[in-house]
Image: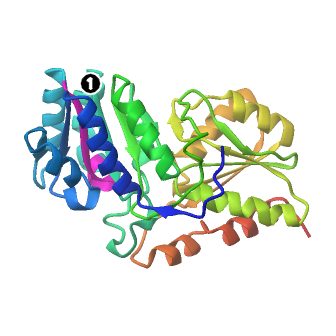
């Protein structure tokens, strides 16, 4: 399932290219953007299908209302902008119009998390997963590499109902072999087997976690590494089985520790397998301007910082 290729690709380019592929197969697909099509790469769909692309301008709430109207008419709608603007600015329209009516709108938000970088706190969506997973009938998915981005988009186009799909600004390391990996919305995925610890992640922090788990192995700590691209609905079995085995769980995410994957894991485990859980993410704070890798390091999301935090958590002398 895991690739051996050392490849780094843009998930936004993959998004744009996949939209064109999906649009070629299905003339019912339409795409909306909020004047950021070069950043989100929906411009690729615009070039291929100009009559099925709508630039709604810097009016994200109107874009969500337009998306709802098109979905009411039977269209499969992909609506995109930066994660900060797609969620916090449009919460009313998403909740009361799209989700309440279970409309077939796929909100694909780019520039999620702290790695928006120099644009700073106003553009760094650290709460978006919390917003979206709290709304009834919204599915929330955070793919970890470009292979998974493509498969998640294919799944979204063929599965009715509202979805929130979050992809980062940064390029992503290849994790999955496209010839072997198959996205399964109904399960968590075990990528590494261990007995001492369970580490849960998704999105761009997954590659950091896989690297950190190798570092931990060198000091005798063998970790189960679980990938949970689907934050809602969170399927329990893989997580439960691992937590019952290891008794200690660490969650790593490019999001606030409040309301995201870490909260979903805690909610699941308190019911199915009470365990000691340590959450690594941004604390109750806004982000700041900085270079992407420096911000990852500052907020403890690089492989080395994850390794150091887990060593302390495990109380290794």
Q: Is residue 254 above or below residue 49?
A: below
The x and y percentages for residue 93 are 21, 36
Q: In which quadrant of the rendered view does residue 156 lie?
A: top left
The total of numbered circles placed on residues is 1
Q: Tell me what residue is drawn at x 56 percent, y 53 percent.
A: 257
Question: Residue 24: image x %, image y %?
Answer: 24, 35
Q: In the image shown, does 280 or 303 lie closer to the viewer?
A: 303
154 magenta-colored: no
Out of 149 and 262, give the one closest to the viewer. 149
142 vs 218, left or right, is left
* Residue 79 in magenta stretch: yes
| Image color mode | rainbow
Magenta stretch, residue numbers: 75-86
Picture residue at 87% right of the left edge, 58% below the top: 221
Q: Which residue is mark 1?
A: 103
Answer with left or right where residue 2 lies relative to residue 248: left
Q: Quadrant of residue 99?
A: top left
Q: Position of residue 112 (x, y in %)?
A: 40, 56
Q: Is residue 317 left or right of residue 299?
A: right
* Residue 77 drawn at (x, y percent): 23, 33
Residue under the point 69% across and 72% down: 304
Q: Is residue 296 above or below residue 247?
A: below
Vertical relation: 117 (above or below) 62 = below
Circle 1 residues within 10 Å: few <14, some 14–19, many ≥20: many
Toward the left, the furthest residue is: 51
Query: Visible in this render: residue 286?
Result: no
């Amino acid at each position: 399932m895991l690739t051996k290729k050392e490849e780094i690709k843009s998930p936004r380019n993959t998004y744009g290219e996949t939209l064109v592929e999906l649009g070629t197969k299905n003339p019912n697909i339409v795409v909306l953007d909020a004047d950021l099509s070069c950043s989100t790469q929906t411009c690729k769909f615009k070039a291929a299908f100009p009559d099925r692309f709508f630039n709604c301008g810097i009016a994200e709430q109107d874009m969500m209302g337009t998306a709802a109207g098109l979905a009411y008419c039977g269209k499969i709608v992909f609506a995109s902008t930066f994660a900060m603007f797609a969620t916090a600015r449009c919460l009313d329209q998403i909740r009361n119009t799209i989700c309440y009516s279970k409309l077939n709108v796929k909100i694909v938000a780019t520039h999620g998390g702290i790695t928006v970088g120099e644009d700073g706190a106003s553009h760094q969506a650290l709460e978006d997963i919390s917003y979206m997973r709290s709304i009834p009938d919204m599915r929330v998915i955070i793919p970890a590499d470009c292979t998974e981005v493509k498969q998640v988009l294919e799944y979204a186009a063929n599965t009715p109902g509202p979805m929130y799909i979050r992809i980062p600004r940064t390029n992503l390391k290849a994790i999955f072999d496209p010839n072997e990996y198959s996205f399964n919305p109904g399960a968590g995925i075990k990528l590494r087997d261990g007995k001492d610890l369970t580490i849960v992640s998704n999105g761009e922090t997954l590659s950091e976690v896989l690297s950190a788990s190798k570092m931990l192995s060198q000091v005798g700590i063998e970790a189960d590494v679980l990938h949970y691209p689907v934050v809602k609905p969170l399927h329990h079995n893989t997580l439960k089985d691992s937590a019952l085995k290891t008794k200690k769980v660490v969650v790593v995410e490019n999001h606030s520790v409040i309301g995201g994957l870490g909260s979903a894991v805690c909610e699941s485990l308190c019911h199915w397998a009470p365990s000691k859980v340590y959450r690594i993410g941004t604390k109750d704070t806004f982000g700041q301007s900085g270079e992407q890798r420096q911000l990852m390091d500052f907020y403890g999301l690089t492989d080395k910082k994850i390794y150091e935090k887990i060593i302390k958590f495990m109380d290794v002398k």
